[in-house]
Image: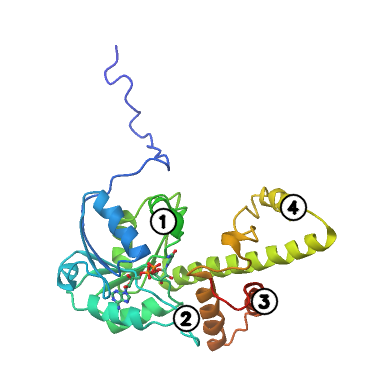
Amino acid sequence: MEKNQGAPPPNSQQVIPHDIPQPKPQKKIGVIGGGYVGGTVAKFYRDGGSDVKVYDKFRPMDELEEVLRQDYIFVAVPTNFNGISIDLSAMDDAMANAAKSKSKAVIIKSTVVAGTTDSYQKQYPHLKIIFNPEFLTESTAYQDFNYPDRQIVGYTDKSFDVAGDIMELLPLAPFNRIVPAKAAEMTKYFGNTWFSVKVTFANQMYDLCDKLGIDYGIVADCVGADRRIGRSHLEVWHGGYRGYGGKCLPKDTRALIKFAEDNGVDLKILKTAEEINKQLTGGVDR
Ligand SMILES: NC(=O)c1ccc[n+]([C@@H]2O[C@H](COP(=O)([O-])OP(=O)(O)OC[C@H]3O[C@@H](n4cnc5c(N)ncnc54)[C@H](O)[C@@H]3O)[C@@H](O)[C@H]2O)c1
């Protein structure tokens, strides 16, 4: 009888099913901003046995000094729309705090416009700054974070050498890409603003169906079964109101319109989506 019967042949590849959580090596993780995203990051690494410290400017958590002693620092502070453009004041503060550490890998989870990570990198050359967009939804945050559809690691000229390590630190996804930070930043805005457009488009189709006496629910079901379109963001009474809302879509849509304008590009479709959404929501952010 042959030895090692049943063992895989020497060059066989191990296929890792996506639904089996992969143990991550235990690390020293710091988080700045302990809200939805930061709290989910912290829980993920704590559950995996890592040593996690969280600093939040407005909630009693760990001390900043404890966070700065960790090996990896995630930044997940708000990036709201201030009425004119994206408000980076919390980011500026969080990055200035992160920069008090020695040479650390800093992973930005907050949604920021293209070029922001590169500009912090220029300002803090002793850090290795990565942009890793977060795609979670609040109601299913932990599940989404654990089992992402994709993992995108955005590098700067100073952080390219740690991009692979950061990818390994993050939950495994079926699609993993290491790209320039600007492309990763743009990916996040493309996704969120596409959802804004999709919601307003669905609402217009709803109005037409309504006028014609057609049951929009049936149409949406049939349309959503097309994998190229998908079911998400077709529901017009999502959360009991019409139009897009929530913490991210309105602010990210406005921020991208302004950012594009500043860069000489008129995002007409997004402006129209904003206008239609204003009518649908009565101008009230939900
Ligand atoms: N919530 C989501 O579904 C989601 C999904 C993807 C990306 N994002 C992005 O992630 C970022 C954070 O979002 P969130 O939902 O976790 O926000 P959040 O408001 O739930 O949490 C942010 C936390 O940061 C703290 N904070 C504010 N300023 C700070 C500072 N200067 N230093 C330290 N802590 C500070 C706040 O007290 C708060 O606890 C935003 O850029 C958002 O666009 C959010």
Dot 4 or dot 3: first in sequence order is 4
**Can you name the residue that lies furthest to the front here?**
240
**Can you name the residue that lies furthest to the top here?**
1
Q: Nearer the viewer, residue 266 or 143?
A: 143
Q: Give the class, few, some or many, for how many residues have Cα within 10 Å of label 4's Cα (few <14, many ≥20).
A: some
> Which amino acid type corresponds to the residue marked 4 in the rendered image?
Val
Whether residue 75 sits left or right of residue 280 in the image: it is left
Whether residue 281 sits left or right of residue 92 in the image: it is right
The residue identified by callout 2 is: 81
Q: Label for residue 219?
A: 4
- The residue depicted at 45 percent of the width and 68 percent of the height is 184
Give x and y (percent) for residue 15.
40, 38
Q: CA distance from mark 4 to mark 2?
A: 35 Å
Q: CA distance from mark 1 to mark 3?
A: 30 Å
Query: Residue 36, can we see it?
Result: yes
> Which amino acid type corresponds to the residue marked 1 in the rendered image?
Ala
Q: Nearer the viewer, mark 1 or mark 3?
A: 3
Q: CA distance from mark 1 to mark 4?
A: 29 Å
Dot 1 or dot 3: first in sequence order is 1
Q: Secondary structure at mark 4?
A: helix
Dot 1 or dot 2: first in sequence order is 2
- The residue depicted at 38 percent of the width and 65 percent of the height is 132
The residue identified by callout 3 is: 279
Mark 1 residue CB less than 8 A from any atom of ligand 1: yes
- The residue depicted at 42 percent of the width and 83 percent of the height is 87
Give x and y (percent) for residue 165.
29, 58
